[in-house]
């Protein structure tokens, strides 16, 4: 069983602060902030449909919240390969 079944989600409107210090081997600058973008309206609608379908299949509920505040936060970062987090 999951410890939390009621989850919030949001669509990031700016690059999350925790992306700073995360490196990847396949972005132009080698960071997660390079190429970051918010989801457009169609992408947001697709996420909403997927979460709605998921809540029909699993004992989970999803509530959209504003800003960068959700348990699940969606945005676009064009990467491939591996990522590592540098500890400061």
Image (tube, grey):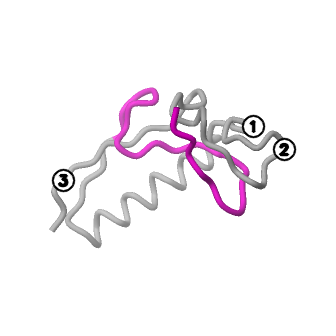
Segment colored magenta = 64-88
Residue drawn at point x = 40 percent, y = 46 percent: 72
Residue, disc 1 = 34
Q: Depth check: 23 or 15 in front?
A: 23
Give yes or no for residue 85 being in the magenta stretch. yes
Q: Nearer the viewer, residue 82 or 70?
A: 82
Q: Are marks 1 and 2 in contact (CB under 8 Å)?
A: yes
**Residue 68, percent from left and from top:** 45, 30
Majority SS type along the magenta span: loop
Mark 1 vs mark 2, CA separation in Å:
7 Å
In the image, residue 11 sits, relative to residue 56, either above or below, namely: above
- Sequence-earlier tag: 3 or 2: 3
Q: Residues within 10 Å of mark 1 (few under 14, many from 20)?
A: some
Quarter of image, res 59: bottom left
Q: Position of residue 28 (x, y in %)?
A: 84, 44
Position of residue 13 relative to residue 52, above or below, is above
Local SS, label 1: loop
Name the residue tied to disc 2.
Answer: 28
Q: How many marks?
A: 3
**In the foreground, 48 or 33:** 33
Rendering coords of residue 43 (x, y %): 61, 49
Which residue is the site of mark 3?
Answer: 4
Is 85 located above or below residue 20 in the figure? below
Residues at marks 3 and 1, CA–CA distance in whole angstroms:
32 Å
């Amino acid at each position: 069983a999951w410890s939390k079944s009621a989850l919030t989600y949001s669509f990031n409107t700016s690059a999350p602060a925790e992306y700073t210090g995360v490196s990847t081997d396949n972005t132009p600058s080698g960071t997660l902030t390079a190429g970051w973008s918010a989801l457009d309206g169609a992408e947001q609608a697709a996420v909403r449909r997927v979460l709605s379908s998921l809540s029909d299949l699993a004992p989970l509920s999803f509530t959209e919240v504003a800003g960068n505040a959700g348990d699940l936060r969606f945005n676009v970062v064009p990467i491939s390969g591996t990522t590592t987090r540098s500890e400061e």
